[in-house]
Image: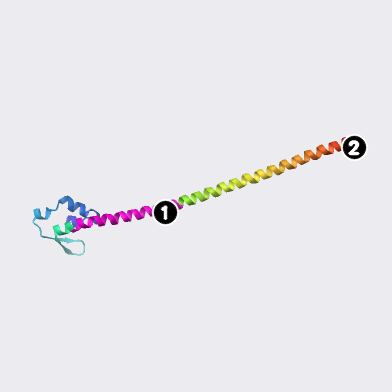
């Protein structure tokens, strides 16, 4: 009844730990167990242990599939977060690049304006010098 009462994830381990011949040593043919729904007959203990042992690979495969599905889900979520962060960084970099480009254009325009003033002053100076 201890094995049957244990959580499903450890029942097989407990049954295996007690050994296949435990029911013979106890001289028990049937075991009654109260799972909260009243007494229920487990049946031949050895048969129950054998059935649980036979189901172990299936249970382990199901658990592995469940864990694998959770891992895939976590991977998808992590990839979505990475994509979001990457998009934000790309946007920030593009904004910084555009700001730098705008500053460069503004400085180029200012330099061209100043160069035009110098050129005009130089030309006006020559014109006045030769006009006298």
Residue 67 colored in magenta in the image: yes
- Considering the numbered disc 1 on the image, is that residue within a helix, a strand or a loop? helix
Q: Which mark is residue 76?
A: 1
Q: Which mark is residue 125?
A: none
Residue in front for this viewpoint, 64 or 89: 64
Residue in front for this viewpoint, 36 or 121: 121
Please report the residue visible at 18 percent of the width from the left and 52 percent of the height from the top: 16
Mark 2 closeness class: few <14, some 14–19, many ≥20 residues within 10 Å: few
Which residue does the numbered mark 2 point to in the structure image? Answer: 131
Residue 55 at what x, y percent from top left?
22, 57
Please report the residue visible at 65 percent of the width from the left and 46 percent of the height from the top: 102
Of the numbered discs 2 and 1, the one sitting upstream in the chain is 1
Q: CA distance from mark 2 to mark 1?
A: 81 Å
Residue 53 at what x, y percent from top left?
20, 55
Mark 1 closeness class: few <14, some 14–19, many ≥20 residues within 10 Å: few
Which residues, given as a range, are shown in magenta? 51-80
Q: Which coloring applies here? A: rainbow
- Considering the numbered disc 2 on the image, is that residue within a helix, a strand or a loop? helix
Please report the residue visible at 26 percent of the width from the left and 56 percent of the height from the top: 59
Residue 23 at what x, y percent from top left?
11, 55
Q: Is residue 36 left or right of residue 75?
A: left
Please report the residue visible at 62 percent of the width from the left and 44 percent of the height from the top: 100
The C terminus - image quarter = top right
Residue 64 colored in magenta in the image: yes
The N terminus - image quarter = bottom left
Residue 12 at what x, y percent from top left?
21, 54
């Amino acid at each position: 009844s201890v094995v049957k009462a244990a959580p499903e994830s450890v029942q097989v381990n407990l049954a295996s730990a007690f050994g296949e011949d435990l029911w013979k040593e106890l001289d028990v043919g049937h075991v009654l167990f109260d799972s909260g729904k009243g007494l229920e007959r487990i049946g031949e203990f050895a048969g129950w242990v054998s059935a649980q042992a036979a189901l172990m690979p299936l249970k382990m495969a199901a658990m592995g599939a469940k864990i694998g599905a959770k891992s895939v889900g976590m991977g998808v979520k992590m990839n979505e977060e990475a994509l979001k962060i990457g998009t934000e960084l790309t946007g920030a970099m593009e904004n910084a690049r555009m700001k730098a480009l705008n500053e460069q254009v503004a400085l180029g325009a200012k330099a061209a304006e100043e160069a035009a003033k110098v050129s005009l002053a130089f030309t006006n100076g020559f014109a006045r010098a030769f006009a006298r």
